[in-house]
Image: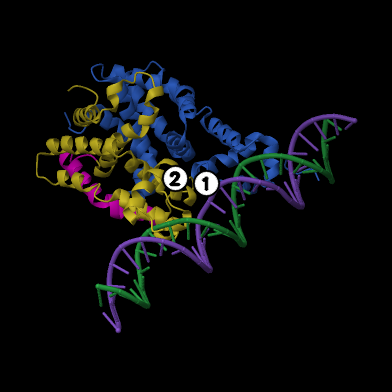
Chain colours: A blue, B yellow, C green, D purple
Amino acid sequence: MRPLNPKNKEEILAIVIPLFAGAGYSGVSMRTVAEKVGVTPAAIYHHFSDKQTLYLAAMAQAFVDKADSLEKILSNGAAPEKRLAQFVARFCELLYNDNDFSTLIQREIMDGDKSRLQFLATEVFDNLFQGVIKLCQELDPQDDPYLLAISLIGIVMYHFQIAVLKPYLPYSKGDHSDPQVVAQHVTRFMLQGLKTC
Amino acid sequence: MRPLNPKNKEEILAIVIPLFAGAGYSGVSMRTVAEKVGVTPAAIYHHFSDKQTLYLAAMAQAFVDKADSLEKILSNGAAPEKRLAQFVARFCELLYNDNDFSTLIQREIMDGDKSRLQFLATEVFDNLFQGVIKLCQELDPQDDPYLLAISLIGIVMYHFQIAVLKPYLPYSKGDHSDPQVVAQHVTRFMLQGLKTC
DNA sequence: ATATATTAACTTAACGTTCGTTTACATAGT
DNA sequence: ACTATGTAAACGAACGTTAAGTTAATATAT
C-alpha cells in the first residue's frame, strides 16, 4: 500500500532535529528515528543514504535562517547601544524559543571533527560573528574585539544552556527563565558592568 | 599469569574520564574502555558492576577537589574586587589545565536525567555557587545576584568551551587561549563593562 | 617453615540484543 | 510503464554483560 502520509525530507528532519539535540549522534539509532517518523528503518534510507548524511542534513536544517534576524539587527544603522540591546533581546528570544539550536551547536563544538567545526565557523557563525565583532569595536574601541565578542555571545548562551539546572540551584526565581528578563540583565551588565558608575 | 600492572579503580577512572569527556556516554563502549586500560572487557566488570556505575564513578572522580581552591578564594576575606580577580584567574587556570572538567559538566547538563542534574547542582556546584552569589551581592547589591552569578560563570566557561572553534574564527589571535589573557579581559569587563567610565 | 586455603585480578569464550545497512519485493499515483 | 515511497526480512558487526577457568600474591593453619 502506498503510505497515506508520504514523508518528504524536511518532515523527517523536523522530527530528527530534536532527537539528535536530545541524545547526540551515537545516542540516536536509525530504528528510533524510523519509529518516531512512523516508518520502517529501511524507509529512512530511501531519503538519506546513511546515518551521517541524515545527521548533517539535520544540522544544516537546524541552522537555516537562524542567524538572519540577528544579522539584520547588527547592520540596521542604529546607535551601538541601541543595537546591542536589540541584538541581545532577539538572541535571547531565539535561544528561548528554539532550545535545539544552542544544544546542537554545543554538541557540534564537543563532538565535531575538524571539517564539521570549520563548517560551523564559516557557514553558520562567520557573518554573525563579524557583525558582533564590529559592534564590539564601536562599543569599546580600546578592548580586544574578539574577546569582547566571545564574552557577549557566551554570557547570553550560558543563561539558556544551564536553564535545565535552574530548578536545583539556590536563589533561582521563576522569571530568570524569561528571555526579556535575561536580555535586560545582560544588556545593562554589558554596558555598565558591575559597579554603578 | 597474574597481571604485571594490576589496575585499581582510580587508575581506570583516570583513563576513562577523558574518554567519556571526548565522546559521551553512548559514544564510549566497554570494549574501548578495556582496550585503553589494557585489559579485556570482562576485567572492567571486576572493578565496576556495569557501565553506568563506571560512568558515575568517573564523573564523581572528575569533580573531586576541583571546586576547593575556588571556594577558598571566595571566602578569603579580601576586598570584593580583589576576590573577583583572583577567582576569575583561578577559574581560567582550572578550565585551561583540565579541559575534561568543563566538557563533562556540559555533557551532564545536556544528557543528565533529573537525579544526575540534582547531584551536579547540590554536590558539585552548590557551595561554589553560593560563594559566587555572595561575591556578586557585595560587588553590586542592586542587581539580581542569581543572574549576575550565571553571567560571571558563563562568561568564563564559554571562552574555554569554544576554544576548539577558535582556529576557524576571524580576529582570533594566539594569546586568546592564554588563561591569563582571558582572565584579565573578563575581570576588567566585569568591573567596568564596555564603556570606560 | 612449610603446606593449604583464600583472594584479587585477570583471561577466554560466549550469551542475547541492538546496531547500521542492504536486498528483494509491494503499492499507489503520474 | 515508471517512479516515489514504502515493507519484511535478514546480514554481519558491535554492543553490554556473564560464566567458568587461570594465575599469582597473601593469609592462615600445622
Q: State left or right for residue B20 relative to residue B64.
A: right
Residue B29 appears in the figure:
no
Under tag 1, what secondary structure? loop
Secondary structure of the residue carrying tag 2 is: loop
Does residue A82 sit above or below B87 in this rendering?
Answer: above
Residue, disc 1: A27
Above/below status of A22 relative to A153: below
The numbered disc on residue A3 is none
Between the C-alphas of marks 2 and 1, the distance is: 9 Å
Which chain's residue wears label 1? A
Residue B129 shown in magenta: yes
Magenta stretch bounds: B115-143
Q: Amino acid at mark 2?
A: Gly
Q: Is residue B104 visible?
A: yes
Q: Which residue is mark 2?
A: B24
Question: Which residue is depicted at the point 41% across and 30% down?
Answer: A90
Image position of D7 with respect to A58: above or below: below
Q: Nearer the viewer, residue B39 or A37?
A: B39
In this rendering, is residue B145 above or below A151?
A: below
Q: Could you tell me the amino acid type at mark 1? A: Gly
Q: What's the chain of the residue with tag 2?
A: B
Same subunit under labels 2 and 1? no
> In the picture, residue A8 is in which quadrant?
top right
